Image (cartoon, rainbow, N blue to C red):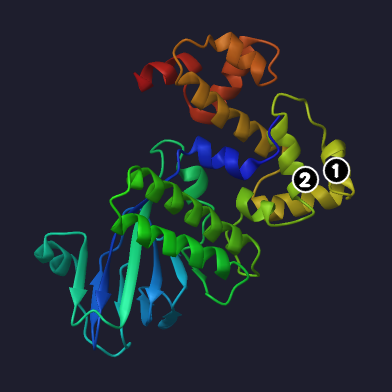
Amino acid sequence: MSADPFSEILNLTKTESVVTGGFTAGGAWALRFPAPDKIKFFAVVKGECWVCIDGEAGPIHFVTGDVGLLSAKRAFVLASAPDIEPVDAMTVFAGAGKQAVQLGDGADFTHIGGHVLLDPASGKLLADVLPPWIHVPAASPHAESFRWMLAQLIEERASEQPGRQLASAQLAQLLFIQILRAHLQSAAAMPAGWLKALGHPRLAPALRLMHGEPARAWQLEELAQACAMSRTTFAFHFRTTVGTAPLTYLTEWRMRLAERALGKEDTPVATIAHSLGYTSESAFSTAFKRATGRSPKHYRNGLR
């Protein structure tokens, strides 16, 4: 039984964090980065900078230990001051012929960055619930763990120790998880979805129950009791927070599990149906086709 929807969804979406490089800078500098096609994260390891994101109200000041996560496809500028004319970052990095570059004497500022890979099919489950932009300041309660992870990342990337690539990947994954945890515990607004519900202490128990036993025929009354609410109050708050009704969410989660199971060619459709609480293969097939537009067998054939 799983009582950790967060981990389960990260596994389902095949979330993989990758450190791609960084740069050092000194003096006056500014780099403009194109809109990323993946979720992007970066951190200030040393010094300070200004971050200007297209569509945001104004520049954001970053200091040592601050971490940012950009999920929206928006271009952005990193600069020593917000009034400096930026140069194209891709030209600078391409011209260097390596991952890390130095601007000026490189003595004032150190940056490390990377991106988050998601499964093309299931990745929307995570991408759609993220806000466009997350800023975790070094002064937050998570600052100590961030400092340790960033220091370890720098050390691993600079070392020749065996296993450094795997260690860097694991640290980057942990950094991404900690960014989302920090955001969940903040008062910042986020889009309606399962992630927002996990940050809602009175709704999270219902999510854990449904993810723990997705095949169970959960009743609205049971879920409401677990959240110490009446049926009406629970249903209202769940729909407002998640964007869908509780039992509709359960069905949608079952379909995501079904899609993953159908990717395993040796699992009979009838077995998948039974594991998700359906009394017959035909009942499951009807529900699956209603949710995805394709029958289970057509979906499986499309994956081949």
The residue sitting at 90% across, 48% down in the picture is: 230
Does residue 181 sit above or below 283 in this rendering?
below
Q: Where is residue 246 in the image (x, y as percent from the top left)?
A: 73, 41
C-alpha span from label 1 to label 2:
6 Å
Residue beneath disc 2: 205
For the N terminus, the image quarter is top right
Residue beneath disc 1: 226
Counting the numbered discs, the total is: 2
Q: Where is residue 16 in the image (x, y as percent from the top left)?
A: 41, 44
Does residue 87 sit above or below 160 in this rendering?
below
Q: Which of marks 1 and 2 is nearer the N terminus?
A: 2
The three-letter code of the residue at mark 1 reads Ala
State if disc 2 and disc 1 touch (CB < 8 Å): yes
The residue sitting at 55% across, 31% down in the picture is: 256
Residue 167 seen: yes
Q: Position of residue 266 (x, y in %)?
A: 47, 10
The residue sitting at 29% across, 90% down in the picture is: 83
- Relative placement, left or right, of 267 versus 250 is left
Q: In which quarter of the image is residue 249?
A: top right
Q: Where is residue 60 in the image (x, y as percent from the top left)?
A: 43, 81
Q: In which quarter of the image is residue 201?
A: bottom right
Taking the view exactly as shown, the residue that stands out farthest to the bottom is 83
Closest to the observer: 40 or 293?
40
